[in-house]
Amino acid sequence: MAETERDLQPVDCAIIHEIYDNGSAQERFEYELDQALEAKRSIIIIEPSRLGDETARWIMVGNCLHKTSVLSGMACLVAPAMLPSSTVNFVMVPTGAVSVVCALLYGVSWQFDPCCKYQVEYDTRNLSRLPLHSLTTATPVVLVRKDDKYRKALHNLVAGLAAALLVYKVYHWSTC
């Protein structure tokens, strides 16, 4: 098989087609997406716009929680080295708390959701290799499975360090 043919038909690709043949089409679309997520397909193409938009938003919220946890945790950790001691607590405490809360919220709501293993693909070069020409919609949502263990480890580590620093600060305040 030629390389271009292999690129056009990924072996591990699931397509949720937008076919309305009965009154429960939306439930069938959701079921097909759940099946593709549980099967850990490397690429999932979602034709139904409502389901695709909801899924993309869900992934975007999870990404936002992850990034907020990491960035606010880093701000908490570097604040003592970068700011004067008179203002460090005004930055360190809220940013550390935000980091911990976002990491906890991500852990409770997203960590065990199979959708968190996917990212929405926007790169036109990668999209051009997919069998999108056979779809009935011009704007499908394409999900690509990504290894997120390092990403999760990063935000858990940063949030954990921020939490430890906050606990140390509270302990230090209570003994003074």
Image (cartoon, rainbow, N blue to C red):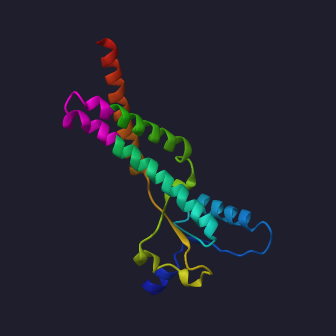
> From which residue to which does the magenta span run?
73-92
The part of the image, by quadrant, that contains residue 77 is top left
Instruction: Establish if 158 lies above or below 86.
Output: below
Identity of the residue drawn at 31% across and 31% down? 90
Residue at x-position 44% and y-position 51%: 64
The residue sitting at the top extreme is: 175
Where residue 89 appears, as percent x and y from the top left, is 29, 29
Looking at the magenta stretch, what is its main secondary structure?
Answer: helix
Q: Residue 109: horizontal and vertical position, in percent? A: 56, 45
Q: How many marks?
A: 0
Taking 110 as reference, is 155 left or right?
left
Q: Can residue 153 be seen at all in this image of the molecule?
A: no
The quarter in which the C terminus is drawn is top left
Q: Is residue 162 magenta?
A: no
Q: Left or right of 100: which side holds 32?
A: right
State the image coordinates of residue 148 (x, y, percent, origin top left).
Answer: 44, 53
In the displayed structure, would residue 117 be above or below residue 168? below
Where residue 47 appears, as percent x and y from the top left, is: 61, 73
